[in-house]
Amino acid sequence: MAAGAVPTPITVTVTGAGGQIGYAALFRIASGAMFGPEQPVALRLLEIPQGVKGAEGAALELVDGAFPLLASIDIATTPEVGFDGANVALLVGSRPRTAGMERADLLAANGAIFGPQGRAINDHAADDVRVLVVGNPANTNALIAQRNAPDVPAERFTAMTRLDHNRAVGLLAEHAAARVADIAGVTIWGNHSTTQYPDLSHATIAGRPAFDVVGEEWGRGAFIERVANRGAEIIEVRGGSSVASAANAAIDHVRDWSLGTPPAAESGVAPWTSVALPSTGAYGIPEGLLASVPARAVAGAWQVVEGLELDEFSRHRIAASAAELAAERDQVAEMGLIPAE
Ligand code: NAD
Ligand code: LMR
């Protein structure tokens, strides 16, 4: 690109753009939080007819934000139009869980959305499309979309466990009275559900093993319970599922994926984060399942952090969450939502 030339806008399609997470995410994307202060964005807001008014309202307010990086705003009501030329697809649109519901209850309600969206991404999105599924049950919805998009490389489909990762880091920092910036090596393994395994066994706080600071009993007990049930805690306290923290995590996820995981100040080594990616079999997770693993983004691609030693406790927890994902996969296969292998 010639010096001084304006980069081509990145087209970001946000489904459920008229809903709560959409509303919290759109303004930050337009402000440059996702791709940096030099990169223009074209926003595509995909909604169903019932949600269009919400998307239209958000679009009016985006104009009123006078964001210098916002190249265009379009509203679509079909996935074919909504994903046309999309470089980044944030699949948020789906029904949120309410008090008393488990994620499994959402499979039937929301699974049917992600097959048609996967097909539309396959046929209409840009060649470099990257997909982040936020709508629950996120991992299995991402599996459905991925399996319906056979021409898109599987690793371009991810599901969001960055919110769980950020929760784990935030709660650890709070408990240890430490700075978030001093925490590294936290991993969320498995499903974005209560079977997830928030793992502190490789975590450090200002360079010290986290278990030496907070104790293994807390780190393998109350901490895991708190992180894994934080979604329900938010629903109970707020009266609705998490919104701003979810939008923030989606922006963190796509920003790192696009720009790379930033290196730590002292070591220069990029710390890892947590991302649900199609498994290649690493850490014993059955191939193909969209399971959360430790990963770094390098040159626009996620790389799984390999070679971490796992003790019996960790192996058991990872296997239990992977088994839940395998059961969800079997359930959606029975429902005909993913093509037969
Ligand atoms: P919301 O009800 O406020 O908004 C959802 C929007 O999606 C609505 O405007 C609805 O019209 C739209 N929608 C429904 N079906 C659609 C379709 N087929 N195409 C396009 N749009 C569609 O809900 P919310 O609070 O924004 O939450 C959205 C989803 O994100 C829920 O499933 C929620 O459980 C999930 N979530 C995930 C995480 C995570 O960490 N992965 C965190 C928080 C929430
Ligand atoms: C969350 O983790 O906050 C969301 O996935 C909402 C939920 O249903 O738990």
Image (spheres, rainbow, N blue to C red):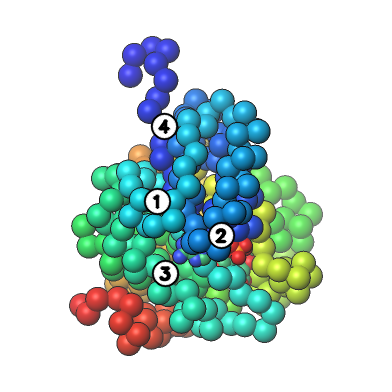
Q: Are marks 3 and 4 in contact (CB under 8 Å)?
A: no
User: Disc number at residue 113?
Assistant: 3
Ligand 1 lies under 8 Å from the Cβ of mark 4: no
Ligand 1 lies under 8 Å from the Cβ of mark 2: yes
Q: How crowded is mark 2: few (under 14 residues within 10 Å), some or many (20 or more)?
A: some
Residue placed most toward the observer, 212 or 263:
263
Residue with the mark numbered 4: 9
**Residue 303, position in %: x, y?**
36, 52
Q: Quadrant of ligand 2?
A: bottom right
Q: Which marked residue is nearer to the observer: mark 2 or mark 4?
A: 2
Ligand 1 lies under 8 Å from the Cβ of mark 1: yes
**Residue 133, position in %: x, y?**
46, 61
Residue at image position (30%, 82%) is 336
Ligand 1 lies under 8 Å from the Cβ of mark 3: yes
**Kind of residue sitting beneath label 2:** Gly
Disc 2 is placed on an element classified as helix
Q: Residues within 10 Å of mark 4 (few under 14, many from 20)?
A: some
Residue with the mark numbered 1: 82
Q: Distance between the residues labelled 1 and 2?
A: 14 Å
Residue with the mark numbered 2: 51
**Kind of residue sitting beneath label 1:** Gly
**Residue 224, position in %: x, y?**
64, 73
**Kind of residue sitting beneath label 3:** Ile
Residue placed most toward the observer, 10 or 203:
10
Disc 4 is placed on an element classified as loop
* Labels 3 and 1: the sequence-earlier one: 1
Q: How far apart are marks 2 and 3 (CA)?
A: 15 Å
Residue placed most toward the observer, 200 or 85:
85
